[in-house]
Each structure stands twice: as structure tokens, then as C-alpha cells.
Image (cartoon, rainbow, N blue to C red):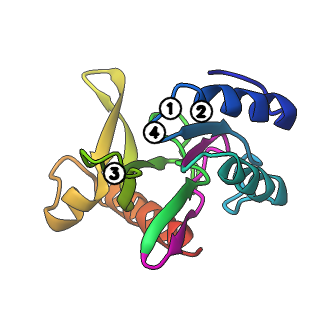
Amino acid sequence: MVNVIDTLQMKSDLRLTQLYNPDIVIANMHWGDEYVTRPNAEQKRLASFLFRNGVRIIIGNHPHVVQPLAKNKTNNEIETVVYYSLGNFVSNQQKINTDGGAMAEIVIHMTDDNSPVKIKSCSYSLIWVRKHTENGKLKYTLIPVEEHKKKAIPELTPEEWQKMNIFATKADQLIGSF
């Protein structure tokens, strides 16, 4: 379903969704303040609202920067997850904090006995956007950060390597800060 951020409509849509007996409800939210690395009060309020109304996982976007990941646990079991913003996946933006993004990694487990779906784990993988010229043409290459921290990428210049590491360090701090 696609809708504007109207809590009355969202509540109605979520009730309707429950009629289909979904295994799990995931919301994708276009929210937050652009270029701000922390979720605002409205994002937090809406996340609580969505969780109270049956959503278990929220994937956020819009701010163009990575924002924290938050998990709510009960008895060591993950109940709900919110990725406030995954940043930029493919973008022309090259300023600090805007030159990359994150991919959500969520493992859910279903059983045959009609037990509720369990969220087994949630994490992320960082992607840095390399903007470069090749054969006179502008190109964008997605670089999986973790993979290339282990093994140097010969195509990256020292300046690009430094930019990728700055992005990765800041993003890791932001995502894990909640």
C-alpha cells in the first residue's frame, strides 16, 4: 500500500492488512529531515505508532544520510526493528555523509506450527558510491565497504579510499548509536 503520512489512514490500512493474516508487516517510510543524521521526534512517534498497530519492521528513507538502527527486545527476542534511514544507495551527492548508504539485512524465521514469525537478526551492510570518469564517461560504482576494507581495491585513489573510510566510520557510529 502507498499512502501519505496520515495516522488515521495508516491505522485503517494496517487494520485492513491484518484481514489478510500476514506473516509479518513491514513498513517503508519516507520521513525525516534531509541531511540530519538523527531521527527527529516525529520519526520516533510514528515508529511507536506503527509498532502499536502491528508493524514489526520499518525501513526508512528520505534524509539522504544514514540514521540509526533500533531494535526492541523482549526476553532476548527481537520484537520490532526500525532502520530510521538507509541513506543514499545510488546518488550523485558526494558531500560528507551523503556519499553512501546501507542495505538492511534482516533474518526472519517461520515455523510450520503457526507460531508467530521471529526476527532472528537485523544488521546492515554499508555501500559507498564511487563517482568517477572512465573512458570520458561519468560512472557510478557501488562499493561494498566491508568487503573492500579487507582487501584494497586497486581502482580507488588514495583520496577515494579516505572518503570511503570516513563515510564508513561515521555511518557505523550513527547506526550503532541507538
Q: Residues under labels 2 and 4: Cα distance?
A: 31 Å
| Mark 3 and mark 1 residues within 8 Å of each other at the beta carbon | no
Q: Which residue is mark 2?
A: 18
Q: Which residues are magenta?
A: 57-76
Q: Which residue is mark 1?
A: 21
Q: Which residue is mark 3?
A: 108
Q: Which residue is mark 4?
A: 89
At 77% from the left and 48% from the top, the residue drawn is: 33
The x, y position of residue 132, in whole percent, is 36, 35
Q: Residues under labels 1 and 2: Cα distance?
A: 5 Å
Q: Nearer the viewer, mark 2 or mark 3?
A: 2
User: Which comes sooner in the sequence, label 3 or label 4?
Assistant: 4
| Mark 1 and mark 2 residues within 8 Å of each other at the beta carbon | yes
Observer-nearest residue: 154 or 9? 9
User: Which comes sooner in the sequence, label 2 or label 4?
Assistant: 2
Q: Residues under labels 2 and 3: Cα distance?
A: 19 Å
The secondary structure type at the circle numbered 2 is helix
- Looking at the rendered structure, the kind of residue marked 3 is Ile
Above or below, 121 against 111 in this view is below
